[in-house]
Amino acid sequence: MVEAQAPQSKNDFISKISIASKEARETAYWIKLLNRKELIQDHPDYLYLQTEIEEIIKILNSILISSKNNR
């Protein structure tokens, strides 16, 4: 996300936010996979991590939609 703070163009910004969104979705996948394998299920921060990554994905997707609409 740091690179998205100094984009070379609007399309560059959209590209970087899109990559960040994909990475966040991959992180959510790994959190869910670790939970299914019961590797982090009992960890006290599991629910917090799951909730936070879902919120991050929503925020990034909102930024992406707004940016595409305001080209």
Image (cartoon, grey):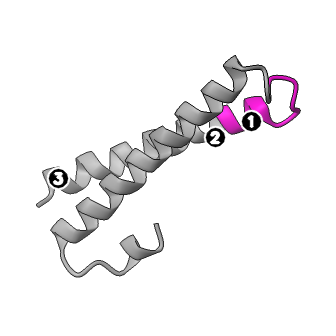
Count residues near mark 1 (Cα–Cα under 10 Å), then give few for <14, some for 14-19, many for 20+: few
Query: Tag count in the figure?
Result: 3
Residue 14 rendering spot, x and y as whole percentages: 24, 60
Residue at the image point whose x is 87% and y is 24% from the top: 42
Q: Secondary structure at mark 3?
A: helix
Marks 3 and 2 close (CB-CB < 8 Å):
no
Residue 20, percent from left and from top: 41, 55
Q: Circles 1 and 2: CB distance less than 8 Å?
A: yes
Q: Which quadrant is the C terminus positioned in?
A: bottom left
The label shown at residue 26 is none
| Nearer to me, 29 or 66 | 29
- Residue 52 is marked as 2
**Separation of residues labelled 1 and 2 (CA atoms):** 6 Å
Residue 47, compared with residue 11, is above or below; it is: above
Residue tagged by mark 3? Answer: 68
- Distance from the alpha carbon under mark 3 to that under mark 2: 24 Å
Q: Are marks 1 and 3 in contact (CB under 8 Å)?
A: no
> Percent x, y for residue 28?
55, 35
Q: Amino acid at mark 3?
A: Lys
* Position above or below: 44 against 24: above
Determine the residue positioned at 23% across, 56% down.
67
> Residue at position x 27%, y 67% from top?
13
- Left or right position of 39 against 8: right
Q: Is residue 45 left or right of residue 63?
A: right
Q: Amino acid at mark 2?
A: Glu
Q: Which residues are magenta?
A: 41-50
Instruction: Give the mark nearest the N terminus, 1 or 3.
Output: 1
Front residue (pair 33, 45): 33
Mark 1–mark 3 distance (CA, rounded to whole Å):
30 Å
Residue denoted by label 1: 48
The reply, left or right, for residue 18 in relation to residue 12 is right
